Structure formats: structure tokens, C-alpha cells
Image (tube, helix red, strand yellow):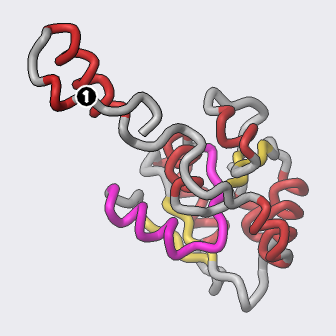
Amino acid sequence: MWTSSIRSIRRPDVDIVYPVHPNPAFHDRAHRQLGRIANIRLTAPFDYPDLIAAMAASLLVVTDSGGIQEEAPALGRPVLVLREVSERMEAVESGAALLIGTGGDRIASETLRLIDCAASRARMVVGGSPYGDGRASTRIASACARYLGVAPDLIVDEFG
């Protein structure tokens, strides 16, 4: 767990929102080590709309979640990925995410670097999702309709 890294980001101008996993081992340790620090808000895991709202309101996102690695870049938020490797390399390759591992010093230093450097954050905003344009289901339906010879008006330009 990265509680020591989070604890080291003790600045009055930085608020940290940490949705804590409900597993008692994580939950209890996080609350014991971080629960009394003024700028850290420990929460239960968010439902999807609240998660999106929280990320949209954030300066940056620090996560080990694969799903959040996909969502945050689409919201224009830089992502620090707490993994050594990721199965979602599109965000890393586009520059929207940075693999920083799980070492406490690097987590703290990279987080503070992005907090303090607007230019570094701006370089990580890629202008859309590195995972596509969100129209895959329409393209699949169009391909199925063409294959079946029905509803040709559903055809969507391959790149449009």
C-alpha cells in the first residue's frame, strides 16, 4: 500500500481524495495511517458517475486501476500508474499516462512534479481517449447490418 507516499504529500494547497478498497486489510491500514491527516479525504469506492465527477474535478489521477487508466485520459487528466507494467499501454504510449511503479519515493516525487508543473500536466493531455473514439459499437452494428444485407443506412464511415 502507498500510504507513506500519500502521507508525504502534506501540503495545505493539495487535497487528496483516496477511495479506499473495502478489503479490511487495506481499509484498516489506510484509515489508521491516513485518517487524521487534514488534506486527505478517505472515501468508500465511488459509483461510476461519482468516479467520473471526481476525476473531472481533479488536477491529476494516481491509480493502479486498469479502468481508470482508460477513463482519466478521456477526461483530459494526466495519469500516474502505480504498476511496473500495464495491459493498457495506449495511454502510456500516447503520453497521457506514466508508469511509475510502486516505489514510495517515485510516487511522491512524480505526483508533486505534476502538481507543481502545469507544463508537464499539459503535455500529458492528449485531446481525447487514446483508446478510440467511442464509436466501436456503431461500427460493429453497421458491419453486421452490411453482412446480413439489412439496414444499409446504418453504415458508418470507417474513420468517421
Q: Position of residue 64 (x, y in %)?
A: 62, 44
Q: Magenta stretch: residue 97 in it?
A: no
Please, what secondary structure does the residue beneath circle 1 have?
loop
Numbered range of the magenta stretch: 48-64
Q: Is residue 5 left or right of residue 151?
A: right
Q: 153 or 40: nearer the eye? A: 153
The percent position of residue 22, horizontal first and vertical second, equals 42, 51
Q: Quadrant of the C terminus?
A: top left
Image position of 50 with respect to 85: above or below:
below
- Which residue does the image show at 76% across and 48% down from the upper left? 95
Residue 32, relative to residue 98: is it above or below?
A: below
Hey, what amino acid is under mark 1?
Answer: Ile
Q: How many marks?
A: 1
Relative image position of residue 40 (x, y in whole percent) = 61, 77
Q: Which residue is mark 1?
A: 155
Left or right for 107, reference 160: right
| Rendering coords of residue 111 (x, y %) | 79, 65
What is the quadrant of residue 66 in the picture? top right
Res 91 → quadrant: top right
- Classify 127 as above or below 89: below
